[in-house]
Amino acid sequence: MNSRDKRSEELQPDILVIGSGAAGLTAALQLAKSCKVAVICKGELNGGSTFYAQGGIAAVLDDDDSIEKHVNDTLTAGAGLCSSSAVDFTVRHSREAIEWLIDSQVNFSRREDKKRMGIADFHLTKEGGHSHRRIIHSADATGRAVSTTLTELAAKHPNITLLTNRVAVDVVIDESAIPRRCTGAYVLNRSSGHVELYQSKFTVLATGGASKVYLYTSNPDGASGDGIAIAWRAGCRVANMEFNQFHPTCLYHPQAKSFLVSEALRGEGAILKLANGERFMSRFHEKAELAPRDVVARAIDHEMKRLGEDCVYLDISHKSPEFLRSHFPTIMKRCLELGIDISKEPIPVVPAAHYTCGGVMVNHCGQTDVANLYAIGETTFTGLHGANRLASNSLLECLVYGRSTADDILANIGTTPHPKQASPWDESQVTDSDEDVVISHNWDELRRFMWDYVGIVRTDKRLQRALNRVKLLRQEIAEYYSNYKVSNDLLELRNLVQVAELIIHSAIARKESRGLHYTLDYPDTDDVLRDTILKPEPSSSR
């Protein structure tokens, strides 16, 4: 194949997958069995949230466990808002998803007391909200093991093209089709600085979540809500955007940017303490340190504000150094680099934005409201997580829905015509910006008022202040976007402002406290169960 043919194949794949995490690569590997697939990622491969996931993947793998138990734990954590069909669908497909990873040679941790060969040979741990040990893991770097394995498989596959340093601007919509359908995407090539047109029969959004909308987050820099904002502008509904999970324990240290201290530590007996050594979680929940994440995050936030402290402490020093090196090598190594020996002293921790439980509305096959546009992973609202995600269900969702999305696309691709030629990106009326300070200033302002006004604890007054500010920012950014050449920073800011507005509107609409949404004005939980569904006006999607 000459270079021109190869370039044409890159720009006109059968399927375009936007995102190279667990969801995107799972779908790509299934699709590549019979289709040409292009996978784009905004930075380098393994730069997304999957790579940094520590804890593991929840699945029913033990004879003493059951689908019913996993389903019930998920429903309980979701505070009444989980879709029972989505939970049942995900859990029932959990074992086959894990078996696929094992067959793909993901190096999961094994039991020391191996009695049988096969899946029972693997070590399972327990995390907050789970009634059973069902978390399969690769020490404390499960995401790294999954991400590197899937990336290596994708890189070797002849039907998959991996394209780095490319960020999606918007999807292409054929307005003349009935129903209107997605035919690809405009993509900024960060190396060349130009926007390229990718055309495909199907497009899959797998860009991850939006936790970078907050000042403090455990997520990597790319978690800017791209897929959610792109889908909204294309005319897709979003749901439950008010439910943002704050991980209770991120390492508190000036040099520890976004370093997560896994929930698995608490699953293995780590204790939360105040600066004076006092335990406090038993005052907030009967399960103490093993309470659901929203309870633990609010408890830590409460104690920090009550005492005026910058952090609390997570202590697992009662475990042996050998145990810690075996189970938590990544955390132990990073803490030692910062002068903290977790075998002798507690770890300073703070809550940080961690997971977006709402997102683009999809069905069990990943279909959105726009024909031929699919979404999977943290970008989506499947109904699995409800008002609070159960630990380690997120990677499972990526795998299960990545596979079901691929199955649905493969079932329909034979009858789907090639898209007609769309208009190329027009940058003839824009110039290079000489005022990038506008982007950096607005970026900082957005993330700070989202943290202060739309964080772990909310009020109507704070939410209204946030809404007033985000409307002004959106106007400024829209003007900037219209007049200057796009850049990665501008696109991320544009998307974050859109997602922030969706979060604020959703939070204002929920007049109760439930799961991850806690408001001082409505501290009680309603008897009526409802999802917060937002639908874009026609003008918002053009």
Image: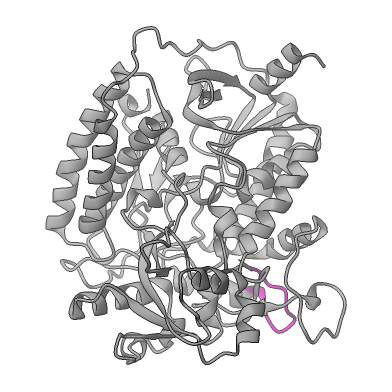
The one of 4 and 533 positioned closer to us in this rendering: 4
Residue 243 in the image: above or below residue 332: above
Instruction: Please give left or right for residue 284 compared with residue 251 in the image.
Output: left
- Position of the N terminus, as image quadrant, is top right
Q: Position of residue 96 (x, y in %)?
A: 75, 61
In x, y percent, where is residue 497? 30, 39
Q: Is residue 301 magenta?
A: no
Residue 475 seen from this side: yes
Q: Is residue 435 above or below residue 101?
A: above
What segment carries the magenta color?
58-67
Task: Tell me which corner region of the image, top left, top right, bottom left or bottom right, holds residue 163.
Answer: top right
95 relative position to 22: left or right: right
Q: Nearer the viewer, residue 439 or 337?
A: 337
Spot occupied by residue 369 in the image (x, y as percentages of width and height): 48, 36
Residue found at the very far right of the displayed protein? 117
Looking at the image, is 438 positioned above or below residue 78? above
Q: Nearer the viewer, residue 322 or 174?
A: 322
| Residue 509 showing in the rendered view | no
- Classify the position of the C terminus by image quarter: top left
Determine which quarter of the picture holds residue 507.
Answer: bottom left
For the point 80% across and 39% down, the residue is: 156
Q: As rendered, which of 160 and 416 lies closer to the eye?
A: 160
Indicate the position of residue 136 as horizontal and vertical percent values. Answer: 67, 71
Above or below: residue 253 compared with residue 407: below
Main secondary structure along the magenta-highlighted residues:
loop
- Indicate left or right for 324 with 261 as reference: right
